[in-house]
Each structure stands twice: as structure tokens, then as C-alpha cells.
Amino acid sequence: MLTTGGCPKTMLSIKDALEAVEGRWKLLILFSLSESPKRFKQLAREVSGITDKTLSRELKNLEANKLVLRQVHDTFPPTVEYSITPHGMSLEKVIEELHYWGLAHRKEVIRQ
């Protein structure tokens, strides 16, 4: 049961959290990166349905929120690798709970 009573600080913290992970793709990107660091094309393959333009925008946003780290390796051509930060890993329980809720939701609403 949620017992916040509409507290403005609670509403603000929930708003901040939602802005950091809003949208269809961010949590899926974080889930993919939680397994191991990946290059851009690896992420594009794993996060099925995302366009390169959207992936690029979402990675920049995740990096700005300190959830993802972008590393450029000194190779030719330069290799760019993305990894989840400890701050991003702090969402692990949220992602796990969303997984379980999604299973229950599918069962309840979609009946599959």
C-alpha cells in the first residue's frame, strides 16, 4: 500500500525518477547493459525494435543521468563501449519488480 498522503517531496522524487527512466526504451537498455558492457550495434540488436537515432538519444539521456557510462577506447577506428554505472545498477530491484508485474499484468489483462 502506498502511504504518502500526497507529500510534495515524495511527488517530486517520483517525478525525478520517472524523468530519468521515462519512455519505452531506457529500462530495456539498462537491463541489456546489466549483463555486460556493450557496443552500440550490440545494444541495437538486443533492444529489439529501437532505431539507431532513438538509441543514440536514449544513451545520451542515460549518460546525463549518470546511469550509463560511455567509454571511447583508443583503437582505430575508435571503439565506443557503454556500461551501466553503479547508480544505474541501483535500479536492479525496480527492473526485477517490473518484470514480475509485467508477467502478472499479461496474465490479468492479456490472458496469456
Image (tube, rainbow, N blue to C red):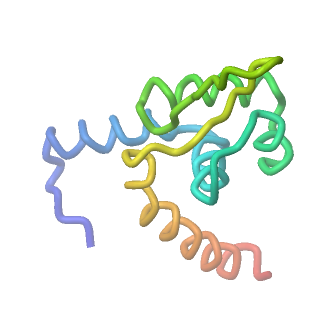
Q: Position of residue 108 (x, y in %)?
A: 65, 80
- Residue that appears at 75% across and 19% down: 78
Work out which residue is located at the far front of the displayed protein and give it.
75
Q: Nearer the viewer, residue 31 or 74?
A: 74
- Residue that appears at 51% across and 33% down: 69
Q: How many marks?
A: 0
In the picture, which quadrant includes the C terminus? bottom right
Q: Residue 41, relative to residue 90: is it above or below?
A: above
Q: Position of residue 38 (x, y in %)?
A: 70, 43
Say whether residue 64 is left or right of residue 59: left
Say whether residue 40 is left or right of residue 2: right
In the picture, which quadrant includes the N terminus? bottom left
Q: Position of residue 60 (x, y in %)?
A: 58, 23
- Residue that appears at 76% across and 42% down: 43
- Quarter holding residue 52: top right
Say whether residue 31 is left or right of residue 62: right
Q: Nearer the viewer, residue 77 or 105?
A: 77
Q: Residue 2, relative to residue 17: is it above or below?
A: below
Q: Nearer the viewer, residue 63 or 10?
A: 63
- Residue that appears at 72% across and 30% down: 55
Q: Position of residue 19 (x, y in %)?
A: 43, 33
